[in-house]
Amino acid sequence: MIRNPIDIASRVSPELSSLIESLIDYLDTSEPITLSIIRLFITQEFNETEQMHHFDISESLIDELDALIEEFGESAAAMDFVYAFASEPLSRVIEEVVNDENRENPATLEAVKEAIDDGLASRLVGEGVLEEDEDDVLLPEIENLIDRFGTDAPAEDFLRYE
């Protein structure tokens, strides 16, 4: 399996990115999932299960997947094509950690998790930056990002600007 050094996930439609991510979760194998495996599953397995589960796979997603395979090869890691953003509340927390003037190193996902554990979310609720119900989902969300991308992933890469 070939890992791509450039940010190719940003070139994938949200629909295809979401489909790839859900298939990776569905297949849940220790083997690396490649673009060719995703395409094979879509074209063969979904045709059989579409009637039972009502999956809606448009031809444009298959065309987009074919274009990715043509450009990056069949052995490209499918996970490289999944784009992840933090939610709006988590983005506000990440911005707070990134903009901390006392920080010596760039903020990582682990640093954000530690800041949440140390009460940053509660402080931001008190300051009105976060709503009271928003801080409850921050820890599971950051843990999910850490599980997917590792503790050393730059937190700033996950900021959602809306």
Image: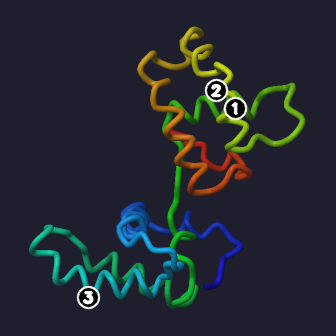
Q: Do tag 2 and tag 1 residues touch (Cβ < 8 Å)? A: yes
**Inter-mark Cα distance, 3 to 1:** 44 Å
Q: Amino acid at mark 2?
A: Asp
In this orientation, which residue lies closer to the viewer: 149 or 158?
149
In this orientation, which residue lies closer to the viewer: 67 or 149?
149
Taking 102 as reference, is 88 above or below it? below
- Image quadrant in which you'd find residue 90: top right
- Which residue appears farthest toward the top when viewing the image? 126
Q: Earlier in the sequence, mark 3 or mark 2?
A: 3
Q: Nearer the viewer, mark 3 or mark 1?
A: 1
Q: Nearer the viewer, mark 3 or mark 2?
A: 2
Locate the N terminus by quadrant. bottom right
- Image quadrant in which you'd find residue 51: bottom left
Q: Amino acid at mark 3?
A: Gln
**Residue depicted at 34% across the width and 81% down the height:** 62
Where residue 114 is drawn, which disc sits there? 1
Q: Do tag 3 and tag 1 residues touch (Cβ < 8 Å)? A: no
Judging by the rendered image, the residue that carries numbered circle 3 is 44
Q: Please state if 45 lies on the left or on the right of 155 as rendered.
A: left
Q: Do tag 3 and tag 2 residues touch (Cβ < 8 Å)? A: no
Q: Amino acid at mark 1?
A: Glu
**Inter-mark Cα distance, 3 to 2:** 45 Å
In this orientation, which residue lies closer to the viewer: 162 or 121?
121
Judging by the rendered image, the residue that carries numbered circle 2 is 117
